[in-house]
Every structure is written in C-alpha cells, then in structure tokens.
Amino acid sequence: MAVRLSWESYVCDARPHYPLLISAKRYWNSSAGVNTLPDAEALTLICTHGAGHHKELWEPTIEYLFEVDARQAKLGGHPQQRRIKEIWSIDSPNHGDAAVLNAAELRFGY
C-alpha cells in the first residue's frame, strides 16, 4: 500500500546549555491524515543513526513502517495495535545537516 510521506525539518537550539545545534526531521503519512491522528495511544517513534551516516538513512524504513501501519489499519488491525502518528529522525551534531550547522564549533574538538 502506497503512502504519501510528508516531512518537516527542524533545528533545535539549546544554547547556551548545549553548544551544538541539532537537526531533525518529522515524518507522517499525509495520505491517511495521520498527522492529526486523535488517538492518544498513537506512537511517536524516534530514529537515530550510527557514526558516518545521517538522519535520511532512515527514510526507506520510515516509509515501510507507515505502509505496514496503513495496511493494518485498513484490515482493521489487532484491537491492541497502536497506530503510528509520527516518526522523528535526528542527526548526530557532527553528521549530516547538523555538521554543516555546527561547522565552526566542530573545528575546536567536538
């Protein structure tokens, strides 16, 4: 089942308590209206990555998870199955978009 994956990019700035910016992407299945899923039990998943990668590494897996979620919802699902509301993918502060944002700070040993 095809889903229409939508996303928004965010930059988290916790300075001065933390010196580096963090980039993240929030994904949802806009074809199913899941962005506004009213179910208080709906899940928010968080994806991080290993060294040498970036947050977009997760996009094929995120799309697959939303496809499985949509398929299960269409079939009626299990009574205790929770839907996926959104999935966040976060860059390590020295990888991907975050590395570009933190280039000056990363020169000093982070």
Image (cartoon, rainbow, N blue to C red):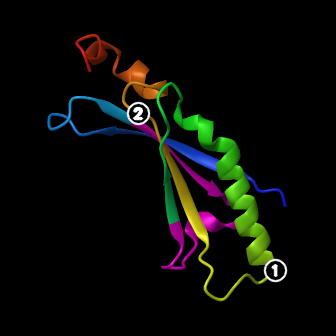
Foreground of the two, 8 or 92: 92
Residue 83: image location, x then y, percent:
61, 73
Residue drawn at the location 80% of the way across and 76% of the way down: 74
Q: Residues within 10 Å of mark 2 (few under 14, many from 20)?
A: many
The quarter of the rendered structure image containing the N terminus is bottom right
Q: Is residue 80 above or below residue 56?
A: below
Q: Is residue 6 above or below residue 51?
A: below
| Residue 31 in sight from this viewpoint | no
Which residue position is annotated with label 1?
75
Q: Earlier in the sequence, mark 1 or mark 2?
A: 1
Residue drawn at the location 45% of the way across and 35% of the way down: 91
What's under tag 2, amino acid-wise? Ser
The quarter of the rendered structure image containing the C terminus is top left
Residue 104 left/right relative to 70:
left
Q: What span is in magenta?
A: 23-43
Residue that sits furthest to the front in the current view: 50
Residue 40: image location, x then y, percent:
48, 79
Residue that sits furthest to the bottom in the current view: 79
Secondary structure of residue under mark 1? loop
Residue drawn at the location 77% of the way across and 56% of the way down: 3
Which residue position is annotated with label 2?
92
Residue 65 left/right relative to 55:
right
Residue 12 picture quarter:
top left
